[in-house]
Image: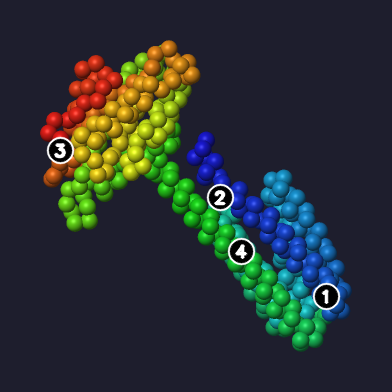
């Protein structure tokens, strides 16, 4: 559900952006009403009143999720307004610039690349047709050259501002989407700790320095004792709550420089950079005690949850998997010795 919400969020942001564009476009049309009244072009002035009304309805439609109605109103307003403005006072008025704003919006707001491409092609045909028409047809209600230049600069400025806003929106959305996807790719969806794949990437980076020399790194492989019994007795939802609670305990107990991830099932792996075996054993004991001494009764348990922990230290020339295998062997030696204990792999530094 959380992943779906994150995936749907960019589309929600798109419609929010569309509402803001309605406000911006409506404000431009209000300004145009006074501009064309002043320039003695009453037809264009009152067209802008109609345009403001259409944007008000489109804004209401977007707010109430009537997106098809809103898109239709915006399309009709921009196309008709651009065509009438151009036919009345000429191509040099710059009304055609507003048509170009549909191109990125069509691709961003459309599920189908094919339908978006068809719409863009239709827009191109309309644009070319309008341009061709104005090469053979004189403006119906021409205005003075200086006034025409003023209208052109005003349109150019408005479109420039709107394109800047759209570009900022698209860049921000893409960056946010990358962050969301990056988080989803590196994080366990249940515990919100790092997942196994990302833990391997981080640990591989930390077991060698920039010169390729082995560095001081320790590993804690941790497993919840009798976890299957919790699931069988209380159900998997309860087991998930236990995993989440332990994840919070681990994050709070480990040092700032350490990092921890869900290794699989009820197993967790912590990587302790710049840590020798003795230090790692002390940290592991602190983690074990924090889990065992946690108030599990608040979760409806009559017995505490405990963890067994295997500790290993990375050896020179050893690959990551070898270090983790030794921690795993120590972990199961601890389980065989009675559980709820820390066991150190033999031969650690």
Q: Nearer the viewer, mark 2 or mark 4?
A: 4
Secondary structure under the numbered disc 2 in the rendered image: helix
Secondary structure under the numbered disc 3 in the rendered image: loop
Residue 10 is tagged as 2
Residue 229's place in the image compared with 324, above or below, is above
* Viewer can see residue 93: no
Give the image quarter of residue 131: bottom right
Q: Are marks 1 and 3 in contact (CB under 8 Å)?
A: no
Viewer-side residue, 295 vs 223:
295
- For marks 1 and 2, the one nearer the N-term is 2
Q: CA distance from mark 3 to mark 4?
A: 58 Å
Residue density around tag 4, few if under 14, some if 14–19, many if 20 or more, within 10 Å: some
Name the residue carrying label 3: 349
Q: CA distance from mark 4 to mark 1?
A: 26 Å
Name the residue carrying label 4: 165
Secondary structure under the numbered disc 1 in the rendered image: helix
- For marks 2 and 3, the one nearer the N-term is 2
Residue 97: % across, % down: 66, 72
Identify which residue is drawn at 31% across, 29% down.
286
Identify which residue is drawn at 51% across, 38% down.
2
Q: Nearer the viewer, mark 1 or mark 3?
A: 3
Residue 148's place in the image compared with 290, above or below, is below
């Amino acid at each position: 559900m959380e992943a779906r919400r994150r995936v749907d969020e960019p589309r929600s942001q798109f419609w929010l952006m569309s509402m803001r564009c309605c406000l911006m476009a409506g404000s431009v049309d209000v300004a145009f009403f006074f501009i064309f009244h002043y320039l003695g072009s009453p037809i264009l002035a009152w067209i802008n009143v109609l345009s403001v009304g259409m944007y008000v309805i489109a804004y209401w439609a977007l707010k109430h999720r009537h997106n098809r109605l809103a898109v239709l109103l915006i399309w009709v307003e921009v196309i008709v307004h651009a065509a009438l403005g151009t036919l009345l006072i000429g191509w040099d008025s710059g009304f055609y610039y507003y048509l170009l704003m549909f191109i990125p919006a069509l691709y961003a707001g459309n599920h189908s690349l094919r339908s978006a491409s068809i719409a863009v092609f239709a827009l191109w045909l309309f644009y070319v047709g309008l341009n061709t028409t104005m090469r053979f047809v004189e403006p119906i209600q021409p205005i003075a050259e200086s006034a025409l230049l003023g209208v052109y600069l005003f349109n150019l400025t408005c479109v420039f501002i709107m394109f800047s806003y759209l570009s900022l929106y698209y860049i921000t959305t893409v960056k946010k989407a990358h962050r969301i996807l990056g988080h989803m790719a590196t994080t366990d969806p249940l515990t919100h700790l790092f997942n196994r794949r990302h833990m391997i990437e981080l640990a591989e980076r930390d077991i060698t320095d920039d010169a390729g020399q082995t560095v001081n790194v320790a590993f804690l492989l941790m497993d919840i004792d009798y976890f299957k019994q919790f699931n069988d007795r209380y159900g998997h939802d309860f087991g998930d709550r236990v995993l989440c609670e332990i994840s919070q305990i681990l994050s709070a107990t480990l040092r700032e420089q350490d990092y921890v991830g869900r290794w699989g099932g009820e197993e967790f792996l912590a990587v302790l950079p710049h840590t020798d075996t003795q230090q790692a054993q002390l940290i592991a004991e602190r983690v074990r005690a924090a889990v065992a001494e946690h108030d599990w009764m608040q979760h409806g348990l009559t017995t505490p949850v405990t963890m067994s922990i295997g500790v290993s230290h990375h050896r020179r020339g050893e690959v990551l998997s070898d270090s983790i295998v030794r921690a795993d062997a120590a972990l199961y030696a601890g389980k065989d010795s009675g559980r709820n204990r820390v066991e150190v792999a033999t031969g650690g530094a």
